[in-house]
Image (tube, coloured by chain):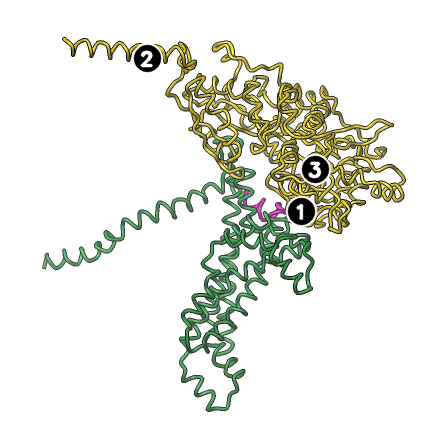
Amino acid sequence: MRMAALALKRKQWEPFAFASPSLVLIGFVILFPLAYSFYLSFQNFDLSVGSDYEFVGAKNYTEAIFRDPRFLGSVWNTAVIIAPSLALELLLGLGIAMLLGRVLHGRPIITALLAIPAMVSPVMAAMAWRMMYGVKYGAINNLGRQLGILDVYFDWFSSPVISIVAVVLVEVWHNTPFMMLVLLAGLQSIPQELYDAARVDGANPWQSFWSVTLPLLKFTMMVGVMIRLIDLTKLFGLIFVLTFGGPGGSTETVAFTTYLMGFKDFRMSYAAALSYVIVGGVLILTLVFFWMQRVREARAA
Amino acid sequence: MRRFWSATSAALLLGALVTLGWLVVPDRAPGARPYEGQTIRAVVNAEYVKYSLSLVEQDLYDKLGVKIETEVIPLDAFVAKTLLEFNSGGSPWDLVMFGPSNMPDYGRHFEPLEPWVEKLKLDFAMDDIVPVFAKVMLRYQGKLVSMPYDGDIHIMYWNKVAFERADNKQKFKAKYGYELLPPKTWKQWDDAAQFFSGWGWDGTQAKLFGAGASYKPSASGFSYHWWRQRFFAYGGNYFDANMKPLINGPAGLRGLEEMVRTMPYYPPGVLLFESEEPKTMLIKGEVPLLHSWTSTGKRVGNAGESLIVGKAGFGIVPGAEIDGKIVHRPAITPGRGMAVSKYSKKKEVTMKVLEFISLPDQSLKIVMDAKTIMDPWRVSHLRAEKFRKLFPDADKYLDAIEQSFPFLVPDPVIPAADEYQRKLSFEITEALAKRKSPKDALDNAAKEWDKVTERRGLEKQKAAWGEKLHEMKQLGIEYHGDWAAKAK
């Protein structure tokens, strides 16, 4: 009886014992920085002034949300970059995934080739595109000249609007393969029988897409969009290399502004508060997105 | 017995050879390499600065026996990383490179030099340092804490082909009503930029541009350097005596409006240009005019890359004509200094190294080399015959630098100087990108400056600025609210 109790106890603590090294590591490299930066966000730690700091309550948060036009501007810039990027990535990703779904031979190879951009690091991608966007010697302008649609001196960063277009193009090139892979997996999980049944019922391809593919792909799309949304709010490397937030502050994203506050102005506490404002914003967006989805599903039911 | 004599003869011969070697090789002389076997750690912000130290490395070893281990922290992270170390009360470095405009934030971490000058009988040849650098770059709270390493200022460069072609001169006079000459005022600069923009002013069919500039936002405050040379020529100053920003007054506004208006005459991509892009356009003959760092001159004269060797003119940055007299206000932009860390455990040897790399002949090697981008900061650098003959018209280039010295305007060297500059620079680029009007941009910048002042403590900042204001007055730089309206 006692042996059985001991064995039961062992069964209870054993998993924790095995997991403890990784739990300690996670605690050290993830939880501690998170907790420390949250603590720091309520202080006034300014590295350029010195190592002393004191508690200032929610001052950093109120400044970020109500009194910092540059940060609020960067929220808008991020939204302006996210919206077209997400829409294009979703549409192109879906289109390519559906085309791939029809490929009978060599699909793995074609998929792998199409996924290459997603494998390139954002900094490398940005450097390559910066050269391609180059005035006079850039590949894009020279190709445009061959086609008679662009001047070699066309400046892709001459105005805020064109710069945002340039950033979105790189972002879409870089991340559409991710959406394609996610949606391809989703498409392949839809049973063929449903399409057969739709065809027997006289549905044309468009109706089949609208009534079978889209409803069954909705959850996968939602997951893909959420992952990309979270990813895009952290948009930094591409901006750092491609535009450095310019021209002016037109491509300054929230992550980039946070970097400037922390590592240029050395306002570590304020930068920590900005990071938590961003996390809060993404959390709210995610919850709203899921809530809307549930409401829509409830209505449909 | 024979073996004994052979061994003795060999030993004697060896001894004689060693003694001879000791006497013949000069660096084996008694007292040489007094710090043999010691290595100091230096920190710099770019590979080319590390390279510049390598130019004196061998002589340093031969003379003192010291080696330098140089760590490069990239420019973007340099201030953050070094200050993080210093503010935590230590540093792994003995010799520290820094931007003089950040002196108020770094100064307390540096070892004062004067006590060591006494103790080690150091000679920094202070009289040979360009007076304006000696006055504004080297002291913290009145104490000498650093030596210059890079004497950055802006001078003007022009392509003589553009300015000397007869048909260009004729066309220009017909359009603007005066002779085409290298500009002396900003008005003339803007006219020339407009005139040269968009056509082959070198006689070719190429599409060329009016002038060069660096307007990249945020990081290094490039656009701020371009704006402030107009701003000061129009009578501006950073703050009044009570720390109220004066940047959004008439002088600032006029300067920025001119920059915005003339944007079309600058090359495509200028809004994201850093320091090197316009220099390259100048030496490739794509822009006829540029005011830029003095290191540009060495690229102009480098036949390996420059197409305008012997075809370039050098002069003082334009100014404004006030009451019939031209007021020039070229900028110190901002240079580099070298100091000894207060936390170094090898202060004595580091002081000797600082003295050595600052010696007129050693520092000349550094500032003459085009690859270092380090600029002259000693009077003897400017007068050195081998520098004056380094490339065609090198003498004129060095003279232009020397002519600029009496008019130089320093950065606002008070705590958070870097932050003030970046906030202003950002707003200037907002106006250049037409996201804000010049007035809104400068008003915003002034508000941001107020916030920085408030965060750092108004009284503390006021006291620091008071000293600088006095220093600037001594340099002949004062606020003139009426100049912007009457400047020609």
Instruction: Depth check: give the residue in front, A20 or B358.
Output: B358
Chain A tint as drawn: green
Give the residue displayed 23% in from the left and 51% down from the top.
A17
Instruction: Depth check: give the residue in front, B20 or B395.
Output: B20
Give the residue displayed 45% in from the left and 84% down from the top.
A195
Which residue lies under the disc numbered 2?
A: B17
Ranked by sequence position, the earlier of labels 3 and 1 is: 3
User: Is residue B241 visible in the rendered structure shown here?
Assistant: no
Instruction: Depth check: give the residue in front, A185 or A197.
Output: A185
Label ID, residue B226: 3
Chain B tint as drawn: yellow
Determine crowd level at label 3: few under 14, some 14-19, many 20+ residues with C-alpha closer than 10 A: many
Ranked by sequence position, the earlier of labels 1 and 2 is: 2
Image position, residue B84 (x, y; %): 47, 33
**What's the chain of the residue with tag 1?**
B
Image position, residue A179 (x, y; %): 48, 66
Instruction: Depth check: give the residue in front, B182 or B454.
Output: B182
Name the element at disc 1.
helix
Determine crowd level at label 1: few under 14, some 14-19, many 20+ residues with C-alpha closer than 10 A: many
Question: In the shown orientation, is residue B399 left or right of residue A170?
Answer: right
Q: Is residue B270 magenta?
A: no
Task: Classify A14 as above or below A35.
Answer: below
Image position, residue B419 (x, y; %): 60, 36
**What's the chain of the residue with tag 2?**
B
- Identify the image quadrant of residue B7: top left
Label ID, residue A20: none
